[in-house]
Amino acid sequence: MRLGLQVPSFTWSGPPSSLGPTFARIARAADASGMDSFWVMDHFFQIEMVGPPENEMLEGYSALAFAAAITERIKLGTMVTGVTYRHPGLLIKTVTTLDVLSGGRAYLGIGAAWNEQEHLGLGVPFPPMSERFERLEEAVRLAQQMWQGDESAFEGEHYQLQRPLNSPQALSRPHPPILIGGTGEKKTLRMVAQYADACNIFEMGRDGVSHKLDVLKAHCERLGRDYAEIEKTTLGRVALSRDGANGTSTVNQAVERFAELASLGIDEALVSMPNVADEASFELVAELVTQLKPIVPAGR
């Protein structure tokens, strides 16, 4: 069982000039602790579940490139890129660049996009949901084609590329993992089964997670996809302490929580940490990572 870190907020104490050093310290601490992966949201305004839109929000791929340069082993991705934010040919080129410069550590985290406020605010077209899912499907098909080195013209309903050249190619083999985020049962999880290397669903209790995985498994069976090939991840929140006081968890309590997810088949728990900018937040993370390592997810 693996543990990854998501950083959803950049609103920390200190002036804007402290954002870079603080973010660097967090990325290095996650890398040194043995965490498997490091994620930032791909948003341009802060989302309402985290804070007001005016709160600081760094552009995702610039932030990951910065993190790549100061870390050594941790994997890097967005949780997740809205398909509407960037033309998919340019997005795939961006993720390829991150993969090459990081030594093969990039994910392509992608979804159908939902935050209309930032689209309207920055003048980014926000098509209806059905069209966004059509665009998502074309984008992941294009990613597979470009990472196979296939330069033949791509003719989709929404995207047409005369020569989808991608040079240099990604270092990850067979390509950077494609993670589709979301829990929609008819479209999102079907696309995971058909195209993705990984999925991400919210921690929603044992029954909720189990149900979503059952839906994914059913799509795999219908499409002839090996369910075991897909990396299953969850997204939650954890605050560690030695005594478990004030809404925090001890390492043992966190191990029990993530072991239960592993028993359902979850390979990696991605978590945000409320006081992540405080160096003390990472004091117990390495211990948690060590205790989770021997836990084998169901189906592995």
Image: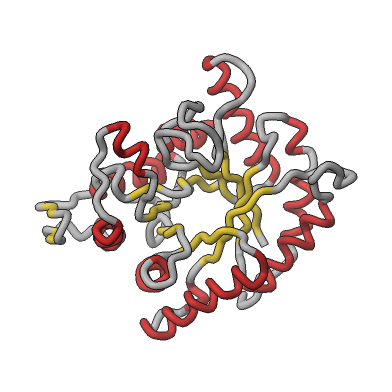
Locate residue 191: give its quadrant.
Answer: bottom left
Residue 25, percent from left and from top:
63, 29
Residue 130, percent from left and from top:
27, 61
161 over 277 or under it: above or below: below
Q: Residue at x 40, y 34 (%)?
A: 44
Q: What quarter of the picture does the N terminus occupy?
A: bottom right
Of residues 102 and 60, the one nearer the viewer is 60
Q: Residue at x 49, y 37 (%)?
A: 68
Give the left or right position of residue 161, taking residue 277 as reference: left
213 over 47 or under it: above or below: below
Q: Residue at x 51, y 34 (%)?
A: 67
Locate residue 9: give its quadrant.
Answer: top right
Give the left or right position of residue 56, taking residue 165 as reference: right
Give the left or right position of residue 78, taking residue 292 as reference: left
Look at the image and tell me whether residue 117 can be seen: yes
Of residues 242 and 152, the one nearer the viewer is 242
Locate residue 138: give its quadrant.
Answer: bottom left
Of residues 192 and 144, the one nearer the viewer is 192
Q: What quarter of the picture does the C terminus occupy?
A: bottom right
Query: Disc count in the image?
Result: 0
Look at the image and tell me whether residue 143 can be seen: no
